[in-house]
Image (cartoon, helix red, strand yellow):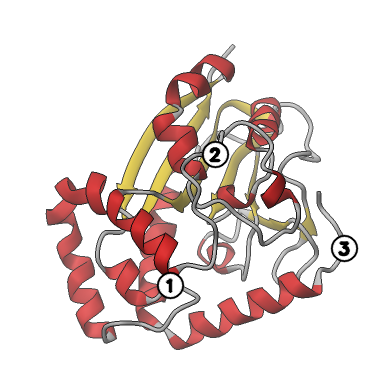
């Protein structure tokens, strides 16, 4: 539920902002991902909204996309609940979620809302953690957020509902990869037009926002340049995924 200023959320985001300033490899990774997300946005007329804008760096790359968050923050223009979107039916061209989906306690409600507010041809573009065999092990050993591949992806997650920063990093994997048949059966208006696994080497070695980098920036950039040639390893080693849903014409 969207709310007023949440001091714990703002403090966590200030830590993210510090990591962003100090880690050039992290910035390079996300800027590549921002370009990828931008390239998937629908060009149809309508409002484009980022849900869970965090420290606002995607808005810097795409200033026409309105930054919002679950609570008021210094980086988001307004507080918006992804499970109760304040937009009229058909008014939205794009919904962008970068590292946000796994924080939703009721993903089915979000998909219902996306189906309602998107115009025909409008899109949901999601960048989120992906659980490959390698990344699942790494997330469980080294990441503070929960990774539960046994969860039901379209049911309410009581653990996530307790706080805005709670999460299940397995959600995108469960909903859009393992749960694709249920997704397509329940949300007929939302076509799953792309699923792409990415982030093989440079991202885990960058340390992300919460751990120390394991390689110098130059080494990380060299590894990042190698990743397209290693795409065949993605099912085994990807740490992130890109998912694109598109509202079907009636």
Residues at circles 1 and 3 in contact by the CB criterion of under 8 Å: no
N-term mark: 3 or 2: 3
* Residue at x 37%, y 54% (from the top left corner): 136
In this picture, residue 123 sits left or right of residue 199: right
* Residue at x 43%, y 72% (from the top left corner): 208
Quarter of the image for residue 55 reads: bottom right
N-term mark: 1 or 2: 2
Q: Position of residue 102 (x, y in %)?
A: 56, 50
Q: Locate the C terminus and report the quarter of the image it occupies.
A: top right
Task: Decide: is 73 above or below 161.
Answer: below
Task: Using the rendered image of the protein, determine whether residue 74 is visible from the camera's viewpoint.
Answer: no
Q: Position of residue 232 (x, y in %)?
A: 15, 46
In this picture, residue 116 sits left or right of residue 218: right
* Label 2 sits on residue: 151
Task: Decide: is 16 above or below 154.
Answer: below
User: Outermost residue toward the left?
Assistant: 229
Crowd class of label 2 (few under 14; some 14 to 19; many from 20; radius 10 Å): some
* Label 1 sits on residue: 208
* Label 3 sits on residue: 4
């Amino acid at each position: 539920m969207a709310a007023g200023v949440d001091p714990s959320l703002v403090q966590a985001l200030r830590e993210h902002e510090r990591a962003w300033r100090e880690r050039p490899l992290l910035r390079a990774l996300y800027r590549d991902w921002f370009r990828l997300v931008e390239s998937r946005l629908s060009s149809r007329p309508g409002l484009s909204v980022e849900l869970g804008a965090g420290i606002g760096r995607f808005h810097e790359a795409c200033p026409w996309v309105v930054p919002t968050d679950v609570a008021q923050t210094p980086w988001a223009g307004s507080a918006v609940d992804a499970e109760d979107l304040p937009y009229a039916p058909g008014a939205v061209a794009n919904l962008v979620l970068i590292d946000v989906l796994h924080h939703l306690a009721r993903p089915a409600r979000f998909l219902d809302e996306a189906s309602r507010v998107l115009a025909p041809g409008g899109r949901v573009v999601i960048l989120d953690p992906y659980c490959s065999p390698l990344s699942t092990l790494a997330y469980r050993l080294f990441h503070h957020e929960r990774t539960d591949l046994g969860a039901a992806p379209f049911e309410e997650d009581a653990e996530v509902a307790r706080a805005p920063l709670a999460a299940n990093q397995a959600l995108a994997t469960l909903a859009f990869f393992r749960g694709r048949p249920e997704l397509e059966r329940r949300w007929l208006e939302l076509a799953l037009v792309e699923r792409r696994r990415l982030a093989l080497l440079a991202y885990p070695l960058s340390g992300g926002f919460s751990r120390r980098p394991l390689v110098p920036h130059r080494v990380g950039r060299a590894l990042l340049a190698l990743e397209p040639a290693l795409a065949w390893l993605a099912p085994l080693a990807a740490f992130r995924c890109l998912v694109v849903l598109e509202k079907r014409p009636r």
